[in-house]
Image: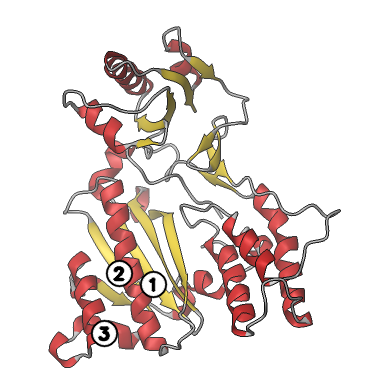
Amino acid sequence: MRFNRVPFGNTSSPFLLNATLKTHLAKYPQSKVVQELKSDLYTDSWLSGADSVKDAHDKFCDARSILADCSMDLTKLVSNCMSITSKSKDGVYHIHDGDESNIVLGLRWCSVQDTLSFDYRRPDDSVEVAHTKRSILSIISKMFDPLGLISPFIMYGKILFQEVWKLKLDWDEELPLELKVKFQKWIHSSQSLNAFHVDRSYFPGMLWGDLKDNIELHRFGDASEKRYGACVYLRVPVDNGSFKVSLVMSKSRVAPIKALTLPRLELMGALLCSRLVNFVKNSLHLDSRTKVMCWSDSTIALSWIKGNLSKKDIFVANRVEEIKEFASPECWQHCPSEENPADIITRGVLADKLAHNSQ
């Protein structure tokens, strides 16, 4: 299973830059690099990239010069290309290949392999974990997954927590045996997360600038009685009329305790799908010409999206109206449940099974 990189700014390019600021960004004259600095600064780090070593190096030098005029220092530079760091001017702390302490938006980035991984520390086997509602919530809250790459695994824990919540147990009350066994399996499988590596680049070896005009966005929504979710993929043509596909990100939600019908949950999955693809499209700076395809395995939800709003109740009408803001009804198509990649999000799986999933 090979997922990909952070969908922000120009980090889709082959050569990634991760520079750290000494202070906060101030106001200064507008330029292309300035706009990128404003949009791609996260706390004290600037993430960017380019399709060539020269462009990446020049961009870093321009950014450093602009920030220096504002009394702001780039104090360290990380790149997956050794020649970029070796060309940088003195005064910048370079992190070279072989270092393993690079963190990008909470994910561990290995610049040598150009992969992202999770730095999840499961509870020590020598320490007995309390089988309580409090413990489940505590472990879920420690899992940082901004791209939704392990959302099916986290969903397993969320479903477990909701089952415990319905029993109205106190926070520190021991779980029933059946739920205790599920909790133990979930914790035990978490050790597989540390071996879970994903490509930082969507399409390694391919230039982002050459791909943007031919990229397609495919989004999938799904739901079950207990949860709903969505995922977004990029698809680009390659030789011989074939395509390459890469997951961008996914989102998952636990269904409200107050029961909704399955068609309404499917509609919620479609809405989450629409919001997600809009975020991805804006983050990757894709223009209005980008082809967007929307997929659902619910014929009822699709009939609502393609139908007349005046004949629907308020719950359905409001959500359909928002869905149509992101894509026309003609973009929505049906896909069989067994071919819907969002299905694994709503099912929830253990980490060892997730690592071997091809979707």
* Residue hosting label 2: 294
Report if the CB atoms under discs 1 and 2 are less than 8 Å apart. Answer: yes
**Residue 221 has which mark?**
1
Residue farthest to the bottom?
Answer: 311
Q: Nearer the viewer, mark 3 or mark 1?
A: 3
On screen, residue 91 versus residue 184, left or right, reads left
| Residue under the image location 61 percent in, 73 percent down | 161
Residue farthest to the right?
Answer: 126
* Residue hosting label 3: 316
Q: Quick one: SS at disc 2? A: strand
Q: Quick one: SS at disc 1? A: strand
Q: Nearer the viewer, mark 1 or mark 2?
A: 1
Q: Quick one: SS at disc 3? A: helix
Dot 2 amino acid type: Cys
Q: Could you give the CA–CA distance between mark 3 and mark 1, rounded to whole angstroms?
A: 16 Å
Q: Could you give the CA–CA distance between mark 1 and mark 2, rounded to whole angstroms?
A: 8 Å
